[in-house]
Amino acid sequence: MNLNTDWNAWTQHGDPGGQPDTAKNPNASSGRDGWVTIQGQVRSKATRANAVSNVPAMIPSSSFAQSGSVWNRRNPASRGACEGKYHQTSTLRQSTIAQSTLAPAIQPSYYGKSVWDQHPANENWFHGFASKERFEEGAIILAPYLEPLYNQKILPGDADRAETQIGAACAKHRPFILLSKSAEHFKAIPLYTYQGQGIGSKSPEVQAEHVSVARSGYPYKQQGPYKPLYLEPNCPWQVKETCVAHFTEVSTFSYSCPIKGLGYVKRESYVQLAELHLKNVHSSIGKKVSYMKEQLEARQNSQAPRRLGALAGMSVHRLTSVAA
């Protein structure tokens, strides 16, 4: 049901000249000035431009607002009977259905805000050309972090949990170490504390993909087989004892993403981090590519036809040895 079309049709039906018939419809407009009289009160007539803005802010009270994981959202049993393999409800239809179940509610302070509204420049957030020129490799930055929420112990209402149409998500700020910069994006390695527990309970293979982050002269918890990455002495960031860098995991950010500078690691620590990343990621990719190339070459050689010394027009299958 198109509210704009039905409203305009209801208020504008009348004589063939296009003017509304106020005798037949007491709520019709007396002109084309965009106003309509309803029950003795003059109100703004709904149009495509203002119909949405006149509706009070609402949130759906349907299944979208209910808590659930990303797996719940992909459960076929949770879909309606009409949402079969060849009859998926369109996005427009879904939003139309949700309109009938909307209920007024108090929206959070960040409702309707952009990512730049939530990260203003007066709070030392940078984006675009400013962040590209300001931060160099080895910088510790704080950036928005969003991914599907896999930890079912984080319940609805938690500050780090967000409810989306595809299920619960982890939405927070996470520190990163800037690894490299490109023309339109940069890559950074995420830092974790794993809920303050560190990586002590993880397998040796997982521990071998992490390196501790510490401050010289301060206590830290040795994690993994490598020496820690050290912060520069003037770095104001307060690093936790269980902080580690997962150097085999790389996040990519557009320069449009707002980031905040927290300090730098020492130059030798950045070199150590880059070498760990190259050895464990790029070198392993290079070995895999070399192995695949050898397989392809062996397959091509095995499938290549053998060249026999046959005369033109003679079938190679009928060649016989000739006695000397």
Image (cartoon, grey):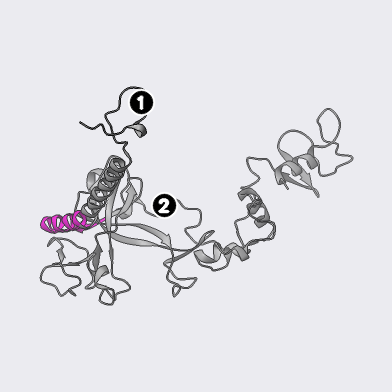
Q: Nearer the viewer, residue 268 or 307?
A: 307
Label 1 is placed on what type of residue?
Met
Residue at 21% across, 73% down: 241
For the image, the number of numbered tags is 2
Label 2: how many Cα within 10 Å (few below 14, some 14–19, many 20+): few
- Residue 199 spot, x, y in % from top left: 26, 73
Measuring from the top left, give residue 184's x and y in whole percent: 31, 41
What's the magenta region? 261-279
Residue at image mark 2: 115
Q: Residue sitting at 71 percent across and 45 percent down?
A: 2
The magenta stretch spans residue 263? yes
Image check: 225 left or right of 107? left
Query: Which of the two labelled residues, at mark 2 and mark 1, occupies the earlier sequence position?
Result: 2
Q: Main secondary structure of the magenta part?
A: helix
Q: Which residue is mark 1?
A: 314
Q: Nearer the viewer, residue 6 or 120?
A: 6
Residue 119 in percent (x, y) is at 37, 54
Q: Nearer the viewer, mark 2 or mark 1?
A: 1
- Residue extending farthest front: 323
Dot 1 falls on a residue whose secondary structure is: loop
Secondary structure beneath dot 2 equals loop
Q: Can residue 319 be seen in this snapshot?
A: yes
Residue shown at 36%/52% (left/top)? 120
Amino acid at the residue labelled 2: Val
